Image: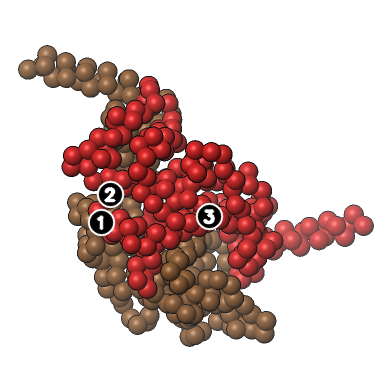
Chain colours: A brown, B red
Amino acid sequence: MAWRDYILNLTVEGIRKQNLAITDTKVVEHLLRTARVGFLGLVDGDEPYVVPLNFVWHRGAVYIHGAVHGRKASLLASSPKATFTIADERGTIAHPVPAKTDTAYLSAMVFGRVSLVEDLREATEALDAMLTKYVPGYYEKPLQSGHVESYVSGAGSHVGVYRLQAERVTAKQNAEDMGMMYYPGRTQRADLRETVDNKRTVEQSV
Amino acid sequence: MAWRDYILNLTVEGIRKQNLAITDTKVVEHLLRTARVGFLGLVDGDEPYVVPLNFVWHRGAVYIHGAVHGRKASLLASSPKATFTIADERGTIAHPVPAKTDTAYLSAMVFGRVSLVEDLREATEALDAMLTKYVPGYYEKPLQSGHVESYVSGAGSHVGVYRLQAERVTAKQNAEDMGMMYYPGRTQRADLRETVDNKRTVEQSV
């Protein structure tokens, strides 16, 4: 699976406000490739567990790495169903009516199952993609599998590479309203005055 | 509970790397008050659900608001155990050895139970705190409970205010190493050269 081209299974199913659903896979791909932190949700009995992680979106999967010990690792071993959520918050949309204050954002949820990557070639490719994402241009050469081998399976190694295979992805966007974005110093009073002025201008021009 | 002063139950329990655990409540309070987005984790059967939300940390609780319909709302009604995670990513710490590339961050997890806020005074206070957080100085007057009443319980209203009472909070920090933070153009080669130069300088000064 990881070695052939993939199809992003972007669905609008389960999104309440269908007008916010993103249907353009390019928008979602861009978000998945550029977001620096994602939030991995796991289930621990009847309690949810949400951990922030660096990650790389690669060949239709979310790759993460981390300790093979600890709460996250033991949850991954016992309960591989996962949700991986990312959000790009783009500021607050002001409105003279308090209840109409809103947030501009772009978000995505990746649903699937997590497994430890056992294939050294796949682990190397994923970690190299991660380095390309977080420290682009820093290393002279691509990551060598020999280096990864000692890293993920060497004596005393405590680190694993995990793959969350994306079974389905949903994404939502509430676009900026550039004329109404909040900035420090913006006031309700000025916005109300401007509305009145605009109305006058429209009336005068009629 | 919501009306008296609270004690932040900050614990280091469950944190694997104890050297990263934050024990200073002021650091955590600041993060909880300034983070713009938090990730609410809920459990849906054996599947986790993680939703990004604006929120306000107020009197020892995370307040959110949102639709009383939809997946989040029905989960909140059926399974009130929640985890609310926030993270402030502060950049990548470069290292000539790939496996030692690291991320600087500050993160917190709030564990507790979620309930719908029924008290109008509490709902008003929470929403007013939220406006103060996201659009400081915008409104001329504090939010009026009459406005909130129509907002959260008016005819055709579909919006609720929810409180996640913080039963315990954990927080972690991996501080920046300012001399090693990645920036575009930084290279492994230059860092290795500098290490050699530093060594020479030390040797010459001995």
Mark 2 Cα within 10 Å, few/some/many (few <14, many 20+)?
some
* B119 relative to A160, above or below: above
Res. A69 image quadrant: bottom right
Quadrant of the frame with the C terminus of chain B: bottom right
Q: Chain of mark 3?
A: B
Q: Is residue A123 left or right of residue A110?
A: right
Q: Is residue A200 left or right of residue B96?
A: left
Q: Is residue B146 left or right of residue B166?
A: left
Residue at horizontal 64%, vertical 80%?
Answer: A157
As measured in the structure, the alpha-carbon distance from the residue carrying label 2 to the one carrying label 1 is: 7 Å
Whether the residues at callouts 3 and 1 have beta carbons within 8 Å, the answer is no
- Report helix, strand or loop for mark 3: strand
> What amino acid type should be assigned to the residue bearing mark 1?
Gly
Please name whichever residue, A194 or B86, is drawn nearer the observer in this view of the structure. B86
- Report helix, strand or loop for mark 1: loop
Q: Earlier in the sequence, mark 3 or mark 2?
A: 2
Please name whichever residue, A28 or A79, is drawn nearer the observer in this view of the structure. A79
As measured in the structure, the alpha-carbon distance from the residue carrying label 3 to the one carrying label 2 is: 24 Å
| Residue B167, label in figure | 3
Q: Which residue is under mark 1?
A: B70
Whether the residues at callouts 3 and 2 have beta carbons within 8 Å, the answer is no
| Residue B67, label in figure | 2
Q: Is residue A151 left or right of residue B40?
A: right
- Report helix, strand or loop for mark 2: strand
Mark 1 Cα within 10 Å, few/some/many (few <14, many 20+)?
few
Residue at horizontal 19%, vertical 51%?
Answer: A19
Q: Chain of mark 2?
A: B
* Residue B164 picture location, percent across and down: 44, 51
Q: Are marks 2 and 1 on the same chain?
A: yes
Res. B117 image quadrant: top left
* Residue B135 picture location, percent across and down: 40, 33
